[in-house]
Amino acid sequence: MTQPSDADARRAVKPVICYPNDTLPKPNLALYQAARDGAAKVEEVIAQPRDAACFRAAAGQFFRITSVEGPQVGDLNLWNANDLSERFYSGKSRALHGTHLTTGERMWSSFPHLRPMATITEDTLGWYGIDAYGGSVHDVIGTRCDPYTGNLLTGSQYHHCCHSNLTRALADELGVSLSEAEPHVHDVLNVFMCTGFTRDTGQYFMKASPVRPGDYIEFFAEIDILGALSACPGGDCSSEHSSDTAACYPLKVEVFAPQAGALDEWQSPDVNGYDRSHGR
């Protein structure tokens, strides 16, 4: 293929940020931290290796995901506990904050709600930054390992990938069939996963996660949350993500409730104020 004569000039055009986020409402991290300091643990759930578990956190509570035995990544889904049609929107969260999330950034919900579901208040891997390969931690660029892609690429019939794990956990939590639960499973926050894009081919890559036992990421629930977390069958995802041979470990989810009065200055965010009648 012949390059045009102005190819270098076209490549040299400076980029423009699609969604400048200076006007996003800022979370009051100082208020959240003060509320967290006196909070008491009210629930603990373990996502076993190659399996998933559901948990609930009321608006104004905190939930923490911790590596407890070995380097392990997890796939996180969030729903409005009172309306499953409102769920985590990874693509919009990526557009607003970037490819990887950390302290002070938020998990935004789907249209037409588009409001913060949860705010990251602590991240012990926040030091990692962006490495020499372009990799970073807690991504919203991947989807979730699933049996359909495995079948497409290799003809495999693997049943413990994160999509399947999340589907089973949600079906059990709601008391519904797998076929009823599956449409609610959505693209994830890849907790602890270290990922990026190759510079030569633009392909999504993964590498060994820097997570170690005791590392955690903590969230403030902005609305009533139903969550599901899968302990990925790829373990630390250093070589593959759908595997029965990779070393895998559990992940712990804890929910904490602040003391009465600690959040008197806070209120749960309203749904997006866009008037949809104008677009019809």
Image (cartoon, grey):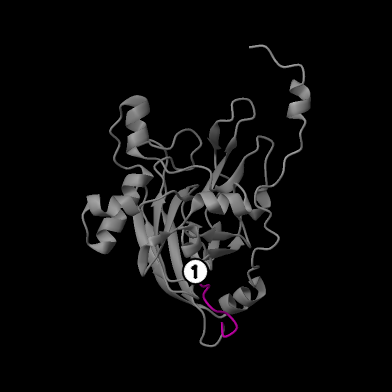
Q: Is residue 77 above or below residue 199?
A: below
Task: Point out the image quarter for the N terminus.
Answer: top right
Across and down, in percent, residue 36 comes to: 57, 75
Across and down, in percent, residue 27 comes to: 63, 69
- Which residue range is magenta in the image? 263-271
Q: Is residue 132 at all visible to an observer of this figure?
A: yes
Horizontally, is 70 left or right of 180 in the view?
A: right
- The quadrant holding residue 87 is bottom left
Horizontally, is 175 left or right of 78 in the view?
A: left
Look at mark 1 in the image and give the residue it sits on: 271
Closest to the observer, 226 or 83: 83
Is 36 one of the magenta-colored residues? Answer: no
Residue at horizontal 37%, vertical 26%?
153
Closest to the observer, 108 or 200: 108
Badge 1 marks a residue whose secondary structure is loop
Q: Main secondary structure of the magenta part?
A: loop
Closest to the observer, 150 or 241: 150
